[in-house]
Amino acid sequence: MRNLTKAVTVISLCALLAACGNDKQARRGADTVKELALLAKSRLSGKKAEPTAQPDPVAMINAVLNEIPNAPLQFVLVEKTGGFAVTSIYGTNGNKVTWISPDRKSMTLESGVLTATRGFGGDLMSVEDGGAAALIASRSSGQAQKVYRFLNGEDETARFIVNCTIAQGERDVVTSGEITAATNVMTERCQSNEGFDFTNTYWIDDNRRMVQSVQWAGAGVGQLVFRRLRY
């Protein structure tokens, strides 16, 4: 809790970022934190962002890294609302790790794959991944049926079933915080029987760790961008 309290007091930054289409998924995830922030400011003002005139999230991230040594940290961006922050670990349960933001929103990832959110509204309650996480971690192609469970406006849990195709893409070097890693880009393209579709993108290093990802968290929340800053 000490590290969590320090993280909450050190950093919290919000902007406005318009969501992009799935065809831009890999490029969006590969953008640096600073580029994302500048784009957000540009969208908000309707003018070209000037790098020297905007808050520098990289400097803020470095402050957290210095203030909280030896603790895992992760950058999270909510594309639809524009909020982004550095998150710290709230708890672990096997391969499931729950991360919490300064405003007490939490995200649970299993081997880096999103399985739950809390505090966003219309939260993702749980996911049955049909073996997708194992395929992604092993950088293997394959098929999986996933069952998402969301909390609706009447505080009831609704099921949403999608069929997903997982494929291995190109190699990419990711630099984020204290991490520099060669990765394989994995794409997970999912579609429901009703024709709704979305794409998740994952960058997996040679130790099967998720370095960064862009993941769908529901119709209300939209896409979340995750970037590990320190393991």
Image (spheres, grey):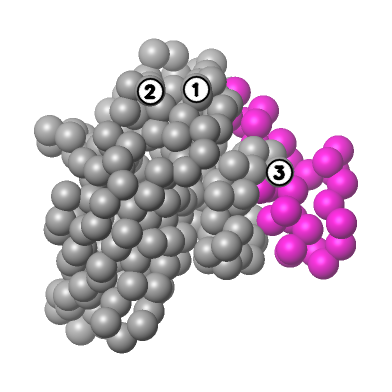
Residue 49 within the segment the image draws in magenta: yes
Could you say whether the residue bearing mark 1 is in a helix, strand or loop? strand
Check disc 2 and report the residue beneath it: 206
Quadrant where the N terminus lies? top left
Check disc 3 and report the residue beneath it: 35
Q: Which residues are magenta?
A: 36-62
Q: Residue at x 44, y 14 (%)?
A: 69
Q: Residue at x 29, y 56 (%)?
A: 117
Label 3 packing within 10 angstroms: few (<14), some (14-19), many (20+): some
Which amino acid type is marked by label 3? Glu
Quadrant where the C terminus lies? top left
> Do tag 3 and tag 2 residues touch (Cβ < 8 Å)?
no
Above or below, 112 against 61 in this view is: below
Residue 126, horizontal then vertical, whole percent? 18, 59
Residue 12, horizontal then vertical, whole percent? 54, 43
Q: Mark 3 or mark 2, which is nearer to you?
A: 2
Residue 227, horizontal then vertical, whole percent? 48, 37
Q: Main secondary structure of the magenta part?
A: helix
Residue 114 within the segment the image draws in magenta: no
